Amino acid sequence: MTTETVAAETVLADLTAMLRELLEEYGLDDAEIGRDTKFHDDLELESIDLVTLSGRLREHYGDKVNFAEFIAERELDEIIALTVGELVDHVVSALRAAGEG
């Protein structure tokens, strides 16, 4: 298993925990969450939930992971179709870039 795989699995676990906390407010914390899970279609998250998630990502990873910038680069339909795996990949690459800097 590569360090990249381990990092992605760790980030997925961290992100899943954050999402469960967020979904708990709606009584949906038992939702299935995996790399293919879509924030909008599967978890029914609204934009305000993504703002909350952004704050939690910043608390957890610091300024190395800029969720707002990640979202800003996308069209609305891409944001609606955004998957957990895409965010995991972004976090992993942001952390790797910060580590190399």
Image: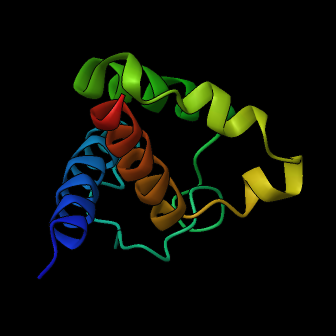
Residue at horizontal 56 percent and vertical 34 percent from the top: 50
How many numbered marks have been drawn onto this rendered protein structure?
A: 0
Q: Quadrant of residue 9?
A: bottom left
Who is closer to the viewer here, 59 or 44? 59
Colouring chosen for the image of the structure: rainbow
Give left or right: position of 41 versus 20. right
Residue at horizontal 57 percent and vertical 66 percent from the top: 38
Q: Residue 74: x, y in percent? A: 80, 46
Give left or right: position of 24 versus 81. left
Asked whether residue 47 appears in the rendered view, the answer is yes
Q: Residue 14: x, y in percent? A: 21, 48
Q: Residue 66: x, y in percent? A: 52, 27
Who is closer to the viewer here, 20 or 6? 6
Q: Quadrant of residue 35?
A: bottom left
Q: Quadrant of the C terminus?
A: top left
Q: Work out which residue is located at the far front of the displayed protein and give it.
A: 101
Residue at horizontal 20 percent and vertical 59 percent from the top: 7
Q: Quadrant of the N terminus?
A: bottom left
* Residue 18 versus residue 86 in the image, above or below: above
